[in-house]
Amino acid sequence: MGHASSLKVIIETPYAETILKAIEPELSSLPSRRVKASARLQDGDLALEIVAEDLVALRAGMNALLRWVVAIDECLRLVDSRQ
């Protein structure tokens, strides 16, 4: 049996507030029941906190959240560059 693990990631992006609003609904549907996540703004940056029952669940939750954040950030940058 694994040990409880947690991870906090601060992401600097000009789109922190928009990304937060986009991922909030996803936080309750992470790929495993063994992981919980929260997100908030911290000094204008996006702060993600992931708590999991074990390292495997932590990795799965982290991968899911970071993929969402990166995809949203890239889309927003693309839209901004075209305006």
Image: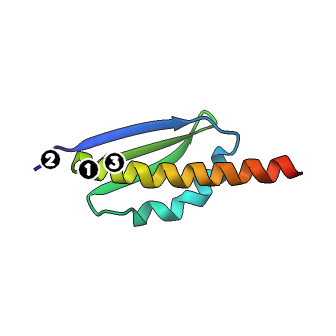
Residue visible at 42% across and 64% down? 28
Percent x, y of residue 33: 28, 63
Q: Is residue 48 left or right of residue 4?
A: right
Instruction: Specify the amino acid type for callout 1.
Output: Val
Q: Is residue 41 left or right of residue 48?
A: right
Q: Which residue is mark 1?
A: 56
Q: Which residue is the extreme one toward the right?
A: 83
Label 2 sits on a secondary structure element that is loop
In this view, 35 is above or below 7? below
How many marks the image carries: the answer is 3
Q: Residues within 10 Å of mark 3 (few under 14, many from 20)?
A: some
In this view, 65 is above or below 6? below
Q: Which mark is residue 3?
A: none
- Do the CB atoms of the residues marked 1 and 2 lie less than 8 Å apart? yes
> Which of the marked residues, 1 or 2, is nearer the chain's N terminus?
2
Q: Is residue 19 left or right of residue 28?
A: right
Q: Which mark is residue 59?
A: 3
Percent x, y of residue 43: 60, 33
Q: Residues within 10 Å of mark 1 (few under 14, many from 20)?
A: some
Q: Which residue is mark 2?
A: 2
Q: Residues within 10 Å of mark 2 (few under 14, many from 20)?
A: few
Instruction: Specify the amino acid type for callout 2.
Output: Gly
Percent x, y of residue 26: 49, 63
- Do the CB atoms of the residues marked 3 and 1 lie less than 8 Å apart? yes
